[in-house]
Amino acid sequence: MKSLVVYYSRTGITRTVSQYVAEALCADVEELIDTKNRKGPLGFVLAGKDAALKKLVPIEPPKTNPAEYDLVILASPVWANTMSSAIRAYLTKHGKEIRAAALLSTTHTSGIAESQRDMRALLGCEVIAAAGFRQKSVKRGEHIAALDAFIGNCKASSPAEQA
């Protein structure tokens, strides 16, 4: 199974989860780079505003083609009960090219279901696994068992594994 992990991370929490998954699945990694400055308190507020308005922000061009992968794992922080603007921009352009997807969300409080619903709407494929994690549990390392279960679901449900 050829897998790709595509993620955006403003604070490093989503990066931590994404790198764990990529290592476990021997997947390639594509970190999305938002060209807007999202640092500090003002960056946080503007990120939430852009997400709430479902704005497409400019991102650096991806280095990989998602159509070349059996499975694409998409990981995003939850901003204003939806995905980050960088993931939205990526999915708007590439979502229909993805053959099979798995979704990961990280949040400070809530919004995982809403965020993943919005991600699914931009995909043209089956979502084979989904999981969400609170930032606090990631910082404490309490997410590993659930993340391992997510990885197991990705392996078991992958179209390439079933062939």
Image (cartoon, rainbow, N blue to C red):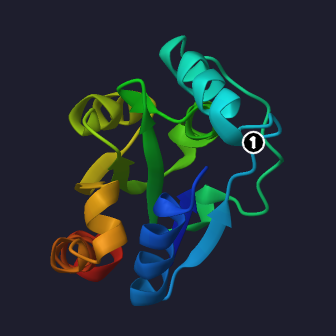
Residue placed most toward the observer, 66 or 7: 7
Say what amino acid the circle numbered 1 marks: Asp
Q: Position of residue 85 (x, y in %)?
A: 60, 31
Q: Residue at x 56, y 32 (%)?
A: 88
Residue furthest toward the front? Answer: 41
Q: Residue at x 78, y 40 (%)?
A: 59
Q: Quadrant of the C terminus?
A: bottom left
Q: Position of residue 139 (x, y in %)?
A: 36, 69
Residue placed most toward the observer, 39 or 80: 39
- Residue 70 seen: no
Q: Place residue 115 in its image quadrant.
A: top left
**Relative vertical location of residue 25 with respect to residue 37 in this rendering, above or below:** below
Residue furthest toward the top? Answer: 53
- Residue 66 seen: yes
Q: Position of residue 8 (x, y in %)?
A: 59, 52
Relative horizontal placement of residue 89, taking residue 60 as reference (left or right): left
Q: Which residue is mark 1?
A: 34
Q: Residue at x 27, y 32 (%)?
A: 111
Q: Position of residue 103 (x, y in %)?
A: 35, 52
**Relative vertical location of residue 113 with respect to residue 22 in this rendering, above or below:** above
Q: Which element is circle 1 on? A: loop
